[in-house]
Amino acid sequence: MPDTGFMSPDNIVGQSGTFFGSEWITPSTGVIVFFSGASNFQTVDGFENDGTLPAGATVVGAEVQLLESYSSPDGQTFDIQLSIDGGSNFSSAITSGNLGTSSGGSGAGADHLVPTSGGATQLWGLDWSGFSDLSQIQLKGSNGTANIVSQHVQLKLYYEEAELTMGSVKLDGAKIQIVSGKFLID
């Protein structure tokens, strides 16, 4: 099944209770800290320069992962929500697996990876029919029970490609050249 590969955001849309919120979110320079509290959140967008999916593609799943992430106290979880309409509506929260230790600090041994949320068949309770514009995607992260540190968030969309259907074709001494793709004759 085709996928977009892991895509990175390039913009912070909204935040409450965060630290280093003015930094761009990139693996080399960005740091996001989600402080504990029910109303604390960070929302990001700008995935892969706001491109589009292939024409006629149907999204069948979405996967989110946080890189170099940890919690204080250790072993906490993180809530992630997804929007495909520019942030007007968000999915219900999906909770990450347990975060790694907060004692790793930066440098060697500090590359903590949160288990991914979602997956190849997880639609997050959203209706993806007709969706193709990546500029409409926003991710919201929040946590109400622990301080969460994450240096990078990524999103991967899984999709099915549109099938090309044609009516009947009559060939009478014609030449057929296939440049790319499949050709099936029943």
Image: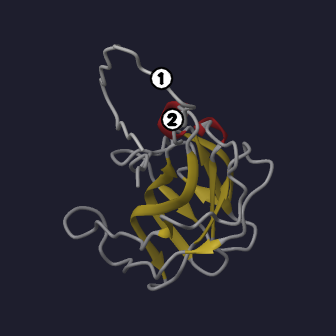
Identify the residue position indicated by label 1 in the image.
170
Is there CB contact under 8 Å for labels 1 and 2? Answer: no
Q: Residues within 10 Å of mark 1 (few under 14, many from 20)?
A: few
Label 2: which residue?
Answer: 54
Q: Quadrant of residue 86?
A: top right
Above or below: residue 35 compared with residue 75: above
Q: Residue at x 72, y 63 (%)?
A: 91
Callout 2 amino acid: Pro
Crowding at mark 2 (Cα within 10 Å: few <14, some 14-19, many 20+): some
Q: Quadrant of the N terminus?
A: bottom left
Which residue is at the far front? Answer: 172
The residue at the point 29 percent across, 74 percent down is 104
Q: Earlier in the sequence, mark 1 or mark 2?
A: 2
Q: Residue at x 49, y 26 (%)?
A: 169
Percent across and percent down for residue 51 are 53, 31
Residue 11 or residue 63, whichever sits in front: 63
- The x, y position of residue 88, in whole percent, is 80, 48
In this view, 46 is above or below 70: above
Q: Quadrant of residue 82?
A: bottom right
Q: Is residue 17 left or right of residue 161?
A: right
- Numbered mark located on residue 120 in the image: none
Q: Secondary structure at mark 1?
A: loop
Find numbered disc 2 in the image and state the secondary structure of the residue it sits on.
loop
Give the distance between the C-alpha atoms of the residues marked 1 and 2, in whole angstroms. 29 Å
Colouring convention used in this rendered image of the protein: secondary structure
Q: Position of residue 81 (x, y in %)?
A: 65, 62
